């Protein structure tokens, strides 16, 4: 029998409840102090998690945001797709800034490898899907980060064409497999219109074998590592990347990413059973943003959206793309809280809303037949047809970046937070009023 059968309420999952960039990096950094191990379970270098400490800003893509604490163990779980080149770059950049990255970083030997042809395929497919033979043809591109995420997860599901991190440690086996894989990929890339010489399996095997040697000290069976930690009574923090509405099963399909980025992905992506995750911190912005294509009922493609983008510096951490901005969609947040099992909320970027006379919150959708629903529609086609039904609330003029207590916030800001809690049915434990660690009003 497994020794660790009693779940520990200290294990926590952090998960985005919207379309990403909710401020998960900041919250993971804050909660790291109370945990021993921080584990990423999904996604890859499509994620961009920012942590601001004093005048230093860090952008983490593959490495868990707990890495800034030298005494914590950071784990890249089996559910992640790892671009070794990006990972090494991230390690080197952190080290150059004085952050220790050694034994404290562990990478699953069963995580999947993103290879250059995945990134080429991602970009070529996006180009192909946005091509229009006639004006009425739809643009089917997703607006991906072009980090090779979809093609790498597709290979994982295809099985025989996938490469796992552990294989980087056996270059001759890698070379043999890449010969077949590269022949296939070269044909596919050519079919997608990529004009490039055929892929060279030997050059690739040499390069990725070298990455394997660099990463060897970090590569291990992280499922056993995590279970050893559980048995030693250590507290684990699960760091979700991307967000619930981008989840491959529960998001706004097909405008989603290719992993289970809700908390439902955490057990599969780490090997830690779901019975251990009893605390789920759902991260939400005080408004909504989205990068890339896909339905966004409360989008404000107007002065309101521009004001939010400017005040919130809403430009992608990974791609630098301007984020689409809009009012808070409570229907969507409540749905994500349900799917993720959120036990608490963190309401981020509240400071960005200072200065509006009036705020709007979407509490229902009007459907094409005129009826109303307060249920989310996790399907792009159907969600694209709804009209948001808004509740209006008074705004506040005062800047709140220096507030030190939730009860010291302007009455209108407190009322806004209370309305979120009453609608979603989950308490707000963290209110964030600026990017820095100290700009946090915590009820815990
Ligand atoms: P993540 O992907 O969920 O980790 O979020 P990102 O790091 O991509 O984007 C969130 C952005 O908001 C980052 O630039 C953070 O530094 C910033 N941020 C986080 N919390 C706050 C806040 O309360 N107020 C403001 N103004 N910025 C914040
Ligand atoms: P973090 O962890 C915001 C979006 C992309 C695109 C779609 C699919 O920083 O919150 P992909 O490259 O994954 O195939 O792109 O998903 N997307 C994100 N948007 N934040 C993210 O991560 C995202 N990860 C993926 O913009 O629309
Ligand atoms: Mg981000």
Image (cartoon, rainbow, N blue to C red):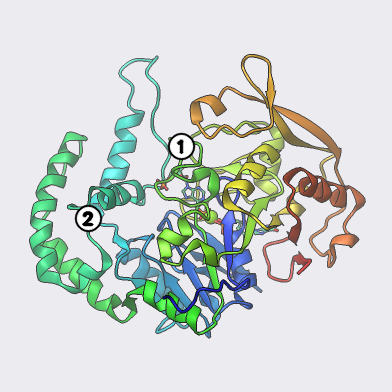
Residue 177 image position (x, y, % from top left): 11, 59
Q: Residue at x 27, y 77 (%)?
A: 214
Q: CA distance from mark 1 to mark 2?
A: 24 Å
Residue 444 image position (x, y, % from top left): 76, 69
Q: In what quadrant of the picture does the N terminus appear?
A: bottom left
Q: Residues within 10 Å of mark 2 (few under 14, many from 20)?
A: many
Residue under circle 2?
A: 162
Residue 269 can be seen, yes or no: yes
Residue under circle 1?
A: 255
Number of marks: 2
Mark 2 secondary-structure assignment: loop
Ligand 1, by image quadrant, is bottom right
Q: Nearer the viewer, residue 78 or 99?
A: 78
Residue 359 image position (x, y, % from top left): 80, 38
Is the CB–ligand 2 distance for label 1 below 8 Å?
Answer: yes
Residue 398 is labelled as none
Q: Is residue 358 above or below residue 337?
A: above
Q: Nearer the viewer, residue 399 or 264?
A: 264
Q: Residue at x 54, y 31 (%)?
A: 295
Q: Nearer the viewer, residue 191 or 195?
A: 191
Left or right: 367 in relation to 161: right
Q: Residue at x 39, y 14 (%)?
A: 136
Mark 1 secondary-structure assignment: loop
Q: Residues within 10 Å of mark 1 (few under 14, many from 20)?
A: many
Q: Earlier in the sequence, mark 1 or mark 2?
A: 2
> In the image as oriented, which residue stretches furthest toward the front?
1
């Amino acid at each position: 029998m497994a020794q660790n059968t009693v779940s520990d309420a200290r294990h926590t999952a952090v998960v985005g409840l919207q379309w990403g960039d909710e401020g998960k990096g900041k919250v993971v950094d804050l909660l790291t102090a109370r945990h021993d191990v921080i584990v990423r379970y999904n996604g890859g270098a499509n994620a961009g998690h920012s942590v601001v400490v004093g005048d230093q800003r860090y952008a983490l893509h593959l490495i868990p945001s707990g890495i800034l604490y030298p005494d914590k163990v950071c784990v890249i779980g089996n559910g992640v797709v790892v671009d070794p080149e990006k990972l090494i770059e991230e390690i080197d950049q952190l080290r150059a800034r004085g952050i220790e990255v050694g034994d404290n970083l562990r990478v699953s030997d069963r995580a999947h490898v993103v290879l250059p042809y995945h990134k080429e395929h991602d970009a070529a497919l996006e180009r192909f899907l946005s091509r229009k033979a006639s004006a009425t043809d739809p643009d089917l591109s997703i607006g991906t980060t072009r980090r090779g995420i979809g093609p790498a997860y597709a290979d994982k599901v295809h099985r025989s064409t996938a490469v796992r991190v552990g294989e980087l440690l056996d270059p001759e086996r890698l070379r043999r497999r890449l010969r077949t894989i590269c022949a296939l990929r070269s044909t596919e890339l050519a079919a997608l219109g990529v004009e490039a010489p055929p892929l060279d399996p030997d050059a690739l095997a040499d390069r990725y074998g070298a990455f394997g040697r660099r990463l060897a000290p970090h590569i291990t069976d992280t499922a056993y590592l995590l279970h050893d930690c559980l048995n030693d009574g250590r507290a684990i923090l699960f760091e979700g990347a991307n967000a619930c509405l981008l989840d491959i099963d529960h998001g706004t399909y097909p405008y989603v990413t290719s992993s289970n980025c809700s908390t439902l992905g955490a057990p599969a992506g780490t090997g830690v059973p779901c019975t251990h995750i009893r605390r789920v911190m759902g991260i939400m912005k005080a408004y909504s943003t989205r990068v890339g294509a896909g339905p966004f009922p409360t989008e404000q493609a107007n002065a309101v959206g521009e004001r939010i983008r400017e005040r919130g510096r809403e430009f992608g951490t990974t791609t630098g793309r301007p984020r689409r901005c809009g009012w808070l969609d409570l229907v969507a947040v409540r749905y994500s809280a349900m799917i993720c099992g959120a036990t608490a909320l963190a309401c981020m970027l509240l400071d960005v809303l200072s200065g509006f006379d009036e705020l709007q919150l979407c509490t229902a959708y009007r459907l094409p037949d005129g009826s109303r629903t307060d249920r989310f529609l996790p399907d792009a086609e159907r969600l694209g047809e709804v009209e948001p039904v808004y509740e209006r609330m008074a705004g506040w003029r005062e800047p709140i970046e220096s507030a030190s207590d939730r009860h010291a916030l302007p009455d209108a800001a407190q009322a806004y937070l209370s309305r979120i809690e009453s609608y979603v049915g989950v308490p707000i434990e963290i209110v964030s009023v600026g990017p820095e660690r100290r700009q946090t009003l915590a009820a815990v």
